[in-house]
Amino acid sequence: MGLLVPQAQAQDAVRARYSVKLIGLALGSATLNGTFDPAAYQVEATARLAGVATMVSNSKGAATSSGTFLQGRVAPNAYATTAANSTTTRTIRMALQQGNVTASEIMPPFEELPGRVPVLDMHKQKIIDPLSALVMPVPGSEPVMGPAACNRTLPIYDGWARFNLNLSFVGMRQVKSKGYEGPVAVCNARYIPVAGHRPDRASTKFMENNRQMEVWLAPVGESRITVPFRISVATMIGTTVIEATDFEASAGKRASR
């Protein structure tokens, strides 16, 4: 009762590879694999620095998330991520029940710094993890590729900080990559810190005032689910662009009626 992904009748899947660039320079690559059925989803992602970036840091990371669809939105049940560089490997795990955090662990823990806005229990309720945030069902009967794909608020908690991403529809574009040629919905994104951040940090202020963030969403199979095809974010040292070079979405067999 209450589990819902509108119109999804069988398991759809996406396998995507992305290039990662900063001010046009190749930084590395990322992957996103996901499966979606009418009641549940599972996604995994990897990222690795390459090229000139390895002169500064040899970093890589991986994450997994799974959950259900509840009233047209994602409700994660489990999230785990591991990030490693030349000096440190850190793992974050969260257990959730319909999007409410029930347990979490960070190993090794982050250092507590003065001026950080405390994360309270209420900040861990009705949230989505950073990986589940990439899974965006389009509820109702509105076109999948249109304003309904974008117009939403993503309440994200990563195990350390709580923030919102407010998405709003900008327009449509046509894209072409290996595996997909067709429309994407272009969304403007705004970062709204809630807790766990340090308000006086220059990077926090920059992101709060950042007007140069976009997400392009592409459809997955015959479901009403979209995932990012392209993400563009202005940073303090230039614009980072993560864009699909290979985007293959497949539709499962539909149940007979």
Image (cartoon, rainbow, N blue to C red):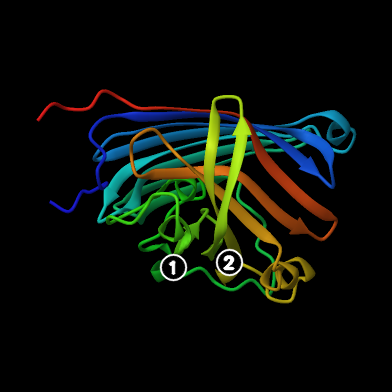
Residue 119 pos. (x, y %) = 51, 68
**What kind of residue is marked 1?**
His
**Front residue of this view, candidates 222 and 116:** 222
Residue 24 pos. (x, y %) = 84, 42
Furthest toward the left, the residue is 257
Q: Is residue 13 visible?
A: yes
Residue 256 pos. (x, y %) = 13, 26
In what quadrant of the picture does the C terminus appear?
top left
The kind of secondary structure element at disc 1 is: helix
Q: Residues within 10 Å of mark 1 (few under 14, many from 20)?
A: many
Viewed as shown, does residue 247 lie left or right of 223? right
**Front residue of this view, candidates 217 and 132:** 217
The kind of secondary structure element at disc 2 is: loop
Residue 240 pos. (x, y %) = 75, 49
Label 2 sits on residue:
196
Residue at mark 2 to residue at mark 1: CA–CA distance: 10 Å
Viewed as shown, does residue 200 lie left or right of 177? right
**What kind of residue is marked 2?**
Gly
**Quick check: marks 2 and 1 in contact, CB under 8 Å?**
yes
Residue 188: image quadrant is: bottom right
- Which labelled disc corresponds to residue 123? 1
Residue 66: image quadrant is: top left
Viewed as shown, does residue 38 lie left or right of 62? left
- 215 is higher (above) or lower (below) than 228: below
